[in-house]
């Protein structure tokens, strides 16, 4: 009997992921065609062929859909810490260096979907509400990086500092990259410049 429960949970989770992805894809198509302001939750649910109740089971509002990929990034940070045998960072420089590969991998992951990445940042740039949301989500990424270091045994002040510095490198790269496929290289360059200081 206990052998069938994980299979049922796995199927349920897979269905949830597919429905969530359908909502995200429908929203992306609509945002790309009409912009953020001219798309309603009703439009998204009609395109995704789901009810409003289903939409709100996954997202608080349409702004949350714009940031769905950031949630995946947060999950990836958590997963990257699982099963690691990396010890605590003894210095701030060592802590930042531990985060370098993780942040660059996240940038590469984010820019795998070049059209989606470009749409995301176009929407954020053009809407004050989304910019505020972006600042919050970006800070959550820094907090998750901090937690990763603390989980390895790094002191909290060092981990907080390193998380903010890694976030700054990412933000510099976002400003410098002229196309999404340059994000990883620009992030690497920002970390290199920091290491040279």
Image: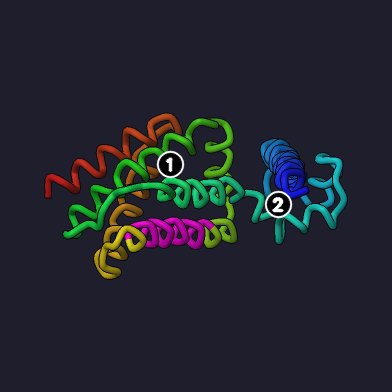
Report the span colored magenta: 134-149
Q: Residue furthest front?
A: 1
In this view, 25 is above or below 127 = above
Determine the residue positioned at 81% across, 40% down: 48
In the image, taking residue 68 as reference, residue 170 lies left or right, namely left
In the image, taking residue 126 as reference, residue 51 lies left or right, namely right
- Mark 2 Cα-neighbour bin, 10 Å: few <14, some 14–19, many ≥20: few
Residue 114: x and y in percent read 52, 31
Residue 129, located in which quarter of the rendered image? bottom right
Question: N-terminal of the two: label 1 or label 2?
Answer: 2
Determine the residue positioned at 68% across, 44% down: 35
Residue 39: x and y in percent read 76, 48
- Is residue 62 one of those drawn in magenta? no
Residue 147, located in which quarter of the rendered image? bottom left
- Is residue 137 one of those drawn in magenta? yes
- Mark 1 Cα-neighbour bin, 10 Å: few <14, some 14–19, many ≥20: many
Closer to the eye: label 1 or 2:
1
In this view, 181 is above or below 59 = above
As drawn, the label of residue 106 is 1
In this view, 154 is above or below 33 = below
Q: Residue furthest left?
A: 197
Circle 2 is placed at which residue position? 37
Determine the residue positioned at 68% across, 39% down: 28
Check whether the beta carbons of the residues at disc 1 and disc 2 lie within 8 A of each other: no
Residue 89, located in which quarter of the rendered image? bottom left
In this view, 112 is above or below 78 = above
Q: Residue furthest bottom?
A: 157
Is residue 34 at least partly visible in the picture? Answer: no
Q: SS for tag 1? A: helix
In the image, taking residue 101 as reference, residue 65 lies left or right, namely right
């Amino acid at each position: 009997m206990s052998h069938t429960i994980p299979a049922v949970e796995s199927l349920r989770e897979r269905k949830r992921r597919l429905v969530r992805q359908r909502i995200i894809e429908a929203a992306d198509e609509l945002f790309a065609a009409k912009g953020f302001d001219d798309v309603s939750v009703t439009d998204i649910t009609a395109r995704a062929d789901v009810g409003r109740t289903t939409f709100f089971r996954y997202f608080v509002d349409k702004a949350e859909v714009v940031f769905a990929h950031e949630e995946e990034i947060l999950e990836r940070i958590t997963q990257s810490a699982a099963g690691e045998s990396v010890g605590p960072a003894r210095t701030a420089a060592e802590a930042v260096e531990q985060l370098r590969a993780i942040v660059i991998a996240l940038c590469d992951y984010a820019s795998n979907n070049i059209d989606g990445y470009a749409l995301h940042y176009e929407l954020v740039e053009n809407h004050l509400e989304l910019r505020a949301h972006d600042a919050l989500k970006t800070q959550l990424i820094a907090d998750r990086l901090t937690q990763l270091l603390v989980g390895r045994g790094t002191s909290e002040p060092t981990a907080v500092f390193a998380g903010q510095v890694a976030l700054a490198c990412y933000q510099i790269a976002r400003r410098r990259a002229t196309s999404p496929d340059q994000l990883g290289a620009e992030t690497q360059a920002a970390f290199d410049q920091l290491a040279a200081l």
